[in-house]
Amino acid sequence: MEIRHLKYLMAVGQELHFGKAAEKLFITQPALSRQIQQLEEELGVKLLERDKRNVALTTAGAYLLDEAEYIINHLNQVIESTRRKAKGEEGEVRIGFVGSAMQDVIPDLLVRLNQQYPKLHTSLDELSNKEQLSALIHDRLDIGFVRMERVPTDYGQKVVFEDSFSLVLPADHQITKDSFESLIQLKAEQFILFSHEYSQEYYENIMSIFADHGFEPNVSHRSVHANTIFRLVEKHLGVAIVPTALASGVSLGVQFIPLASLPQRTRLTAVWDERNRNAALKKLIALL
């Protein structure tokens, strides 16, 4: 077995189409089929079920595909770290984050990291909570900053920031900070919320706010991006509830009304795989 066999399996497993996978790999379809057959013969198992129209992963194929993605990503990281160490650098730590973490937490952490370890390189990737967990599992990230009430118990985790919520209204809305008394005043409004795809637990937390006020919101739009939500509010397409930290630095035509008296809170949690041997990651964790 060679690395290319795993890369070929990944291409076919992701596309579930030999023709498209061959194009992606810049090889012919017959050549790709032979490589997959070689891999199956060496392992002595069937990885793919295929006929003239369909390609599907077997249970064994799905398992190997998942592991192959981890192996390839880890190998790429090792190669990159080797090159950086040859240049006198201290390696690289790959950081994933949800947008709100960029308000204060990530910039402050990077400043401290740069002061203490100036030769340590960082890469940043804004991803949803689910995407970060998948990236951690497949070694595309070293650490993620997520807004999830529950994370896998076999992962290292640390709550780095706890936040209240704020109401987001158009700048010229009839309700202002001075006139706001209760969420009940906005019962008839359309609401723009973070999608449950952002985080099911976060979504349920938001919905509990409405439940406490005795009504179910009319949700007109859902998004996983804060800036999209703010733009929609600015255009009078609804109102929103977001973590208060997101109010920092927003220069759009919206106003924020703190809901700090509500019991609901949202937590930003750092998550990492305890088995990760990246020395650069350990240095970052020490600064948390």
Image: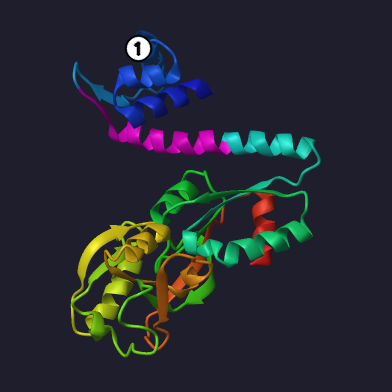
Is 20 situated above or below 274?
above
Question: Magenta stretch mostly in which secondary structure?
Answer: helix
Residue 129 or residue 213, whichever sits in front: 213
Answer yes or no: is residue 1 visible. Answer: no
Residue 56 screen position, x and y as percent: 25, 29
Residue 261 or residue 140, whichever sits in front: 261
Residue at the far front: name it: 172
Drawn side of residue 49 relative to residue 150, left or right: left
Question: Colour scheme of this structure image?
Answer: rainbow
Answer yes or no: is residue 104 visible. Answer: yes
Determine crowd level at label 1: few under 14, some 14-19, many 20+ residues with C-alpha closer than 10 A. some
Residue 66 or residue 262, whichever sits in front: 262
Is residue 247 a member of the stretch shown in magenta?
no
Residue at 31%, 73% (x, y): give it: 206
Q: Give the range drawn in magenta.
A: 54-74
Is 166 situated above or below 279?
below
Residue 131 screen position, x and y as percent: 42, 50
Is 214 situated above or below 105?
below
SS class, disc 1: helix
Q: Quarter-wise, where is residue 187 in the image?
A: bottom left
Residue at 43%, 12% (x, y): give it: 27
Residue 158 screen position, x and y as percent: 54, 68
Residue at 56%, 39% (x, y): give it: 74
Please, what is the three-letter code of the amino acid marked with disc 1?
Answer: Gln
Residue 8 screen position, x and y as percent: 42, 22
Residue at 59%, 34% (x, y): give it: 76
Task: Give the residue at mark 1.
Answer: 29
Residue at the far right: name it: 88
Drawn side of residue 144 relative to residue 257, left or right: right
Is 40 situated above or below 247?
above
Query: Quick one: quadrant of the C terminus?
Result: bottom right
Is residue 64 a member of the stretch shown in magenta?
yes
